[in-house]
Structures are given as C-alpha cells and as structure tokens.
Amino acid sequence: MTEKREKEPLFYIQQPNFQIPENRMQTIYSSRKAEQERKQNENLLDFAVPKEVQKVPEEKIEKTAGQMEVQEAIEEFESGREEKKGASFAFTTEKRKPSFNRVKSFKEMDTLERLDYLIDFPKQLPPIPCTFETGEKAIRGFLVSKNEEWIEVKLFDERIEKINLQSLNAIKMIGLRS
C-alpha cells in the first residue's frame, strides 16, 4: 500500500502538489482473553519470585485495600443483576417505544384525510393521478388545490375542473401507467 503512494507519476499535466494524508490505524486493542492472559502471567510471577524479594510500598497496600472494596461492590452488583436478569429484560422492552409513528395507508384514510395527503404530497415527486368520484361522474386527474368548499382537479388533457366538496364521494389512486 505504501509502495503505491511513494511512486510519482511519470507524466505531469498541470497537476498540483498533493499532500498524502497520514495513515492512522489502530495500534492498541484489548480483549477479555488478553486481560486473562496478563493476569495469569502476573500470578505465575508471584509464584516464581519469593515473597521476601517482592517489596511493596505502603501506599500501594492502601490502594489495593480500596480496590478490594470496589471489587466487592462490583461483584455484589453483578450478582444482584444476574438474579434479576429475566425481569430486567422484560422491563426494558415494555418501556421501549417505536422510533417512527405508524402512518395510515391511503386506503384507511377518509376523504378529507386523502385530500390533505394529496395536497401535502412532496413537490419533489410527481403528482399522483387519482379518480375523484361524485354522485354523477368520476373525474380522473391530479389534485391542484383545495379550499373550504371546492377542490381543483387538473385533468389529463390539461383542463382544470372544480368539484364541490359536498358532492365528492370517494378518491382512489390510479397509479402510474407505462
């Protein structure tokens, strides 16, 4: 990998001087297995070196006593945690809420909700062709605007037709045709 970066191009055509970024890769890691091996090696050293040779300052003895208290507290906490493990799992799932709210499908919406959905449809997407059914006829086109009493529908032949909201029975999506 470094060999490719050290090679310079053979032919320059108005290229700036590039500064190659420095690679920063992981240099230190830890794992439970490595920690266990380190502890085993320390234990082997304790057996190999006599106690008279090992001299520990008093400060370290006080720290180890404090560390022992902390270790005991951790062990008590974990033992209590293991006993309640099944109950705590059930508790966490009960409070969990979905990250997204479920949105009604178009078929589940009533007529006014469908109109609001079509009006608020993202402008980046093409409009959805629909069939607007009234008592007398069915009009096919795209919803253009809506006010308190009327909706405007742009027909496929580019005409705009007004429909009274009171006479509107149903709205159905047609879908895209190829």
Image: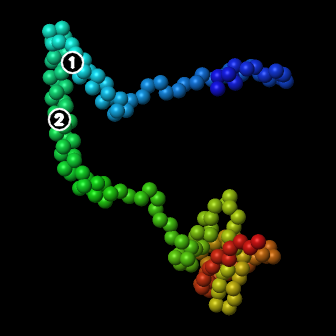
Indicate which disc residue 46 carries.
Answer: 1
The residue drawn where x is 21% and y is 51% is 84
Q: Nearer the viewer, residue 145 or 3?
A: 3
Residue 55 shows up from this direction: no
Three-letter amino acid code at disc 1?
Asp
Q: Is residue 137 above or below residue 45?
A: below
Instruction: Left or right? Give the position of 148 relative to 74.
Output: right
**Image location of residue 23, percent across then percent down:** 58, 24
- Give the percent coordinates (x, y) of residue 128: 68, 70
Quarter occupied by residue 43: top left
Looking at the figure, which quarter contains the C terminus?
A: bottom right
Quadrant for residue 2, please give it.
Answer: top right
From where the camera sits, is residue 11 visible? Answer: yes
Question: Callout 1: helix, strand or loop?
Answer: helix
The residue wearing badge 2 is 73
> Cβ–Cβ below 8 Å for labels 1 and 2?
no
